[in-house]
Image (tube, grey):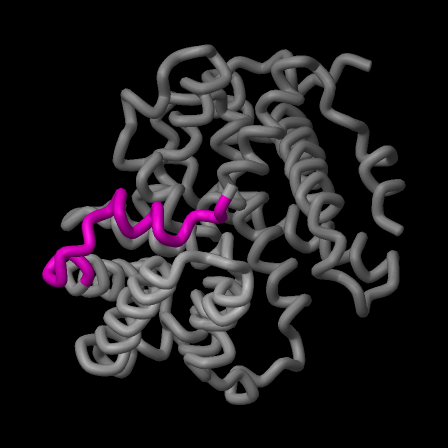
Amino acid sequence: MKHDRFENWLRNIYETRDEEISCTECFDLVSRFVELEVSGQDAVAKMPQLKQHLSQCRACRDEYEALRDLRRLDEQDGMPSIDDLQDLIP
Amino acid sequence: MLLMSNTRTNEEWLHDLQASGATQEAALADLRNLLLRAVLFFFSRNLGDFGGLARSEVLQLAEDCAQDALIAILRRLSDFRGDSKFTTWAYKFAINIALMTARRERWKGVSLDQLSFSHNSTLFEWTMQDRSSGLVPDRSAMQGEISEIIREVIEHDLTDKQRHVLILMVFNEIPMDEVVQRLGTNRNAIYKMLHDARRKLKSGLEARGFEVHETLALFSEPG
């Protein structure tokens, strides 16, 4: 294991809570979290359990990051067209 | 070009998708278009997962994912609570399916049995590298002690299932959905196993007096 991954893993171990939400609960809540973030509200303070899950779960975090970035593009009317996106596939 | 989809309110989305005739057809077409964009957006950020595929195959996979997402959304329409834009809620289905598809492609043909676990070559690899970098001996000794506690907890305190999943995901970096699929389970069950494993590791470290700040300071990169 690489040094920085080991360090992150140790951090995850220490940040473990007795009660953590499941991936299903995360999926249900993540769109609200993203919406709060994009509208400039303190999403972490309002939904600390979701943030905690995201820091522990790589799969949910990957999905959250893509969702957040998509939502931001939407907000800026910057969503690329299907043609443009297809051109990104080599 | 201004898309129809950007002009619908949440209520209009729900109404149009459950309407009939041309109204519903237009809403379905707009939604499918948005979902395809979400999938392509995700794929374009994860091109490394599709190394073995031709472009046309990747584009077809994207179409399939968008279709699957559309079906999932129509099934779950009554779950939408209106606490986000409808499109944000819809995107997450597309991203979820796109991620599972991408990871499946990457790990296709890899047998998990080939992935063995050796403490010496994984968990402690960097510790050995560290020793040559002129660290004070006390620090090395304490790092070794922490590593030993972790090893003991993994070997003696975890259940076989917890150990197996930990080795696959933490030490071999197998994505969750791949483990889910190969073990015939679901994300929640895998997350719970890792959560229980972390709780045991945390207890083990704290019981030996290693508190969070001290431990992380020992393992953070010097300088």
In the rendered image, the vertical position of residue B33 relative to residue B208, given as above or below: above
Name the residue: 73% across, 19% down.
A78
- The answer to whether residue A4 is visible is yes
Name the residue: 45% across, 74% down.
B168
**Left or right of B136 in this view: B44:** right
- The answer to whether residue A23 is visible is no
Name the residue: 57% across, 44% down.
B95
Rendering quarter of residue B138:
bottom left
Q: Residue furthest bottom?
A: B113
Nearest the camera: B43 or B133? Answer: B133
**Left or right of B138 in this view: B41:** right
In the rendered image, the vertical position of residue B155 relative to residue B68, given as above or below: below
**B219 within the magenta span:** yes
Q: Quadrant of the N terminus of chain B?
A: top right
The residues colored magenta run B205-222
In the rendered image, the vertical position of residue B72 relative to residue B153, given as above or below: above
